[in-house]
């Protein structure tokens, strides 16, 4: 080992590659998992609750909502949904 590398090594934190991997791992979601198939989750959390992942991932396979995503839903407990469209929507000017 050259002297420069030996000098640098003494100031580097002693962590294994596995420890680094564990620290940077984020949850991976399987849409078919039982916890995501419950009626409560599908009604009140699917594409309503914000995604806990911070790194880029395939949001089309993720059951959580993402910024700017068109599939995002409003929480039905706080927003009123109706089977009848808004009259302004029919005109093409609805801002809701």
Image: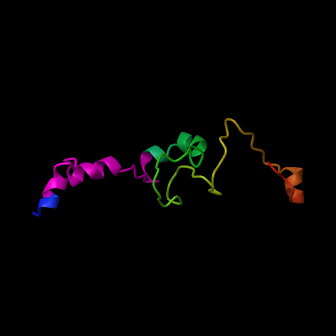
Percent position (x, y) of residue 5?
16, 60
Q: Is residue 52 above or below residue 61?
A: above
Which residue: 63% across, 52% down? 72
Q: Quadrant of residue 48?
A: top right
Percent position (x, y) of residue 40?
55, 39
Left or right, 14 with respect to 85, comes to: left
Left or right, 51 with respect to 33, comes to: right
- Which residues make up the magenta segment? 6-34
**Was residue 19 drawn as part of the magenta stretch in this picture?**
yes
Q: Quadrant of residue 91?
A: bottom right
Which residue: 75% across, 40% down? 80
Which residue: 39% across, 49% down? 27
Left or right, 51 with respect to 70, comes to: left
Which residue occupies the foreground of this view, 39 or 51?
51
Circle count: 0
Q: Residue furthest top?
A: 77
Q: Residue furthest bottom?
A: 2
Which residue: 46% across, 49% down? 53
Percent position (x, y) of residue 15?
21, 48
Quadrant (top left, top right, bottom left, bottom right) of the N terminus:
bottom left
Which residue occupies the foreground of this view, 42 or 2?
2
Q: Residue furthest left?
A: 1
Q: How is the image coloured?
A: rainbow
**Was residue 25 drawn as part of the magenta stretch in this picture?**
yes
Percent position (x, y) of residue 7?
15, 54
């Amino acid at each position: 080992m050259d002297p420069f590398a030996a000098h640098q090594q003494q100031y580097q934190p002693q962590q294994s590659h596995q420890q680094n991997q564990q620290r940077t791992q984020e949850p991976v979601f399987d849409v078919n998992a039982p916890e995501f198939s419950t009626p409560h989750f599908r009604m009140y959390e699917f594409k309503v609750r914000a995604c806990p992942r911070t790194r880029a991932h395939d949001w089309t396979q993720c059951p959580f909502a993402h910024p700017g995503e068109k599939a995002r839903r409003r929480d039905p407990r706080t927003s009123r949904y109706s089977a009848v469209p808004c009259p302004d929507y029919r005109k093409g000017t609805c801002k809701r």
